[in-house]
Image (cartoon, rainbow, N blue to C red):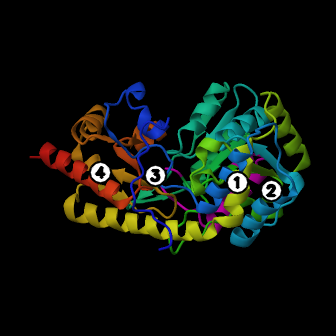
Amino acid sequence: MHYDFDTIVDRRNTKSLKYDFALERGKPQGILPLWVADMDFKTAPGIVERLQNCISHGIYGYSEGKQEYFQAVSSWYARYFDWETKEEWLVKTPGIVFAISAAVRAFTEPGDYVLIQSPVYYPFREVIESNERKTAVNSLIQKNGHYEIDFEDFEKQIVEKRVKLFLLCSPHNPVGRVWKREELIKIGKICKNHQVKIVSDEIHSDFTYPGHQHYILASLDEEFLQNTITCTSPSKTFNLAGLQVSNIFIADEDMRGAFQRAVEQTGYSQLNLPGLVACQAAYETGRDWLEELKQYLKGNLDFVRAFLEKELPEIKLTEPEGTYLIWMDFRSLNLSEDELEELIVDKAGLWLDGGAMFGAEGKGFQRMNIACPRRTLEEALNRLKAAIKDEIK
């Protein structure tokens, strides 16, 4: 490999949310964190170089992306996802959760139901309820360690609760599904038939494992394009979350106008300068780095799978099709949520994301971030093994 993903970079005392805020978040000092979805890898060298040039200039005034910025973003999606976009569709925001919140305000009224598919990324529910809307839940069905959509219930929720907006997580966090083309088409048709607008969070789209292909919902049909707010960002792909940059594509002029008004109501305007620079650099220079990263992540996944099968058969891995987050089933241990938290945090010394935060369907599960050097992952699994073996003596 040309790039080093094995070296452990010390992130402590860098204002890292992942490493430096254990005590503030109720965790013991020194806990090993594999929770929040950022990576323990330095970003691509081309991005670092551009940022260094930007910082050395010494002036950080109001900034905006020019045509070259759009060209970098649009070329990425044209080349790797066969999706041709137009510059007027683009609305830049500081993050996808920010954009989802704006969409909730733009396309629903207080008291309206917004549909999610649980277990799902917990800010979906948070932005619905913090904006005084109600959550309609289409629970994903787990069959033999694999999650599927209950389409009958999906449509039933829309009809019975008069749903106006659906939040799609694609690829799905935390269960790791990369939705098949036919699944997305079915979603798109049901929503169009019932006049339900779609917010499609595709932040993990660059991370799929061999044998799986990510399809952008809006690229599959002109009607879907005109009914979808497509949320993209380089933040997960290139470890840029702290720079706060996302690219939201809305083809329908009326929908885009309503969304822009909701953004403007927050008082927000331009992206920060380093975010603009990093995003353009990522899409122009980062592909080789990303391909090697994906190989390394596959190696990490293979390592986890083999470890669990040999050392911890009690824990069942939900085989991920995408993302660098894995969803593990601890239910065979027959522990309450509090007991499972004690096992993970106090006995294993690990900071993972408890499944219940993703919805009631996540009880008994844990989400682990495997985007870290192999030695870190090995240490985490050995800690988990020791704690569980002690638990079941």
Whichever of labels 1 and 3 marks the residue nearer the N terminus, that label is: 3
Name the amino acid, label 2.
Tyr
Which residue corresponds to the image point at 81% horizontal and 35% vertical from the top-left? 269
- Left or right of 281 on screen, residue 288: left
Q: Badge 2: how crowded within 10 Å, few (<14), some, or many (20+)? A: some
User: Which stretch did the figure color magenta?
Assistant: 173-199
Left or right: residue 380 compared with residue 187: left
Q: Which residue is mark 3?
A: 40
**How far is disc 4 from disc 2 in space, using C-alphas?**
40 Å
Where is 126 relative to 142, above or below?
Answer: above
* Residue 70 appears in the picture as rendered: yes
Residue 230 in picture, x, y percent from top left: 73, 52
Q: Secondary structure at mark 2?
A: helix
Secondary structure of the residue carrying numbered label 1: helix
Q: Which of the two labelled residues, at mark 4 and mark 2, occupies the earlier sequence position?
A: 2
Ranked by sequence position, the earlier of labels 4 and 3 is 3
Question: Considering depth in this image, is 8 or 84 the residue closer to the camera?
Answer: 8
**Which percent across, then down, holds residue 157?**
62, 42
- Which three-letter amino acid code belongs to the residue tagged 3? Asp
Q: Which mark is residue 279?
A: 1
**Residue 248 marker:** none
Write down the residue under mark 4: 380
Q: CA distance from mark 1 to mark 3?
A: 19 Å
Residue 141: % across, % down:
47, 53
Contact between marks 4 and 3 (CB within 8 A): the answer is: no
Q: Between marks 3 and 2, how big is the CA–CA gap?
A: 27 Å
